[in-house]
Amino acid sequence: MRIGLIGLGRAGGVHFDAWRLVDGSDVVAVCDPSPVARKRARDLGIRTYTNPDVMLETGGLDAVVIAAPPADHTELAIKSLERGLHVLCEKPLALTTWDAMKMLQTADRCRRTLLLATKFRHVPELAQARELIAAGKIGDPVAFEVSFCSPVDMSRRWNAQRSRAGGGVIIDNGCHAFDIVSYLFGTVTWVQANLHKSQQRLTVEDSATIQVRATDGVIGKIDVSWSLSTGRDSYVAIYGSKGTIEVGWRTSRIKLGSADWETLGGNYDKIDAHRRMLTCFVEACCGRAAAWISTVECLRTVAAVEAAYRSIHSGGWERVDMKGMRERRGVARATTRARVATPVGA
């Protein structure tokens, strides 16, 4: 499977390293405006481009990974799909649900796979936590916490430029957080977001707390920040009627009743999570396995971010708006058929 990578920055660099560990695939082309990034690829014998249109036209590709700024995702994905390429897109999938819908409709029409890069679904400890919840190990899930907080100077990063990123830390870190909630509990239905006092001189938000209502009445909290640190190891905590599960950066564990904590796993491995995801992407494109995330889930992640920003302005709870879902369900069914029916390079 011949892969083209659009964007070799922080996220693209992780994809670049992880693809080298995936059997049956080869990154053959890289597009990035940075001379330093292009040199990194050229030093490994990979063709480089500054114009994505040229790469898509002449690169001899089967699929592309889009790790460019979010404002470019929709245009790049549609162009790639219309050239017959499968697409793995970094988060956020798009800046609006309607843009995401256009991307998914194009994938359906072109009979190609379009998937959102949700690396945390491929973290073994989080997958184990999901299985334990489903098996009733901690009883009924009652509440949860998701925390992506780490002090980072964002003054020179495009992630803090509204025109390129679509917002601040909510759209940047919130995408992963909302996806984790969906992965563990099924659906994000309502959100209420509140901003913290800004600690960086940015034109976008740098810290926020988001209350989330999921299916079956489970309510939890998401903390996202570029300026604050919680000082805790766990980035996910699930509280049930019979126990607690924590998934952390260094260790994961479970506590049932008054018993001692039991270890579930070790360090979070970003490269390994990407390797697992990219392997699944190849399998899905080749029709050998189902995708790890549905079309509806991709759309709901975008809609949850939109609802969070609406909540900041309204000051109250906002429904995760899935208007037009009838058409979207149709796309989801058709896209699933296309994944099974269309081999790589066909």
Image: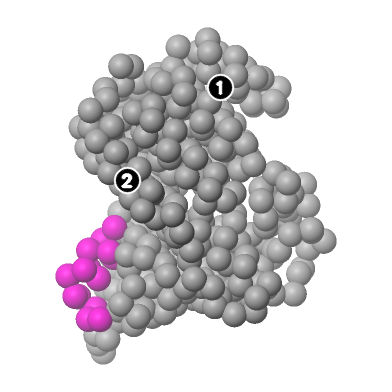
- Specify whether 223 is left or right of 335: right
Disc with the residue nearer the chain's start (2 vs 1): 1
Which secondary structure, mark 1?
strand
Which residue position is annotated with label 2?
330
Q: Is residue 113 visible?
A: yes
* Magenta stretch: includes residue 139: yes
At label 2, which amino acid type do we have? Answer: Gly
Q: CA distance from mark 2 to mark 1?
A: 34 Å
Q: Which mark is residue 30?
A: 1
At label 1, which amino acid type do we have? Answer: Val
Q: How is the image coloured?
A: one colour
Classify mark 2: residues with Cα within 10 Å, few (<14), some (14-19) or many (20+): few
Residue stretch in magenta: 127-140
The answer to whether 118 is drawn above or below residue 344 in the figure is below
User: For this rendering, which residue is in front, 190 or 263?
Assistant: 190
* Magenta stretch: includes residue 314: no
Name the spot of residue 188 as percent of width and height, x first: 41, 67
Q: Is residue 13 visible?
A: no
Q: Residue at x 79, y 58 (%)?
A: 203
Name the spot of residue 198 as percent of width and height, x first: 76, 69
Camera-near label (2 vs 1) is 2
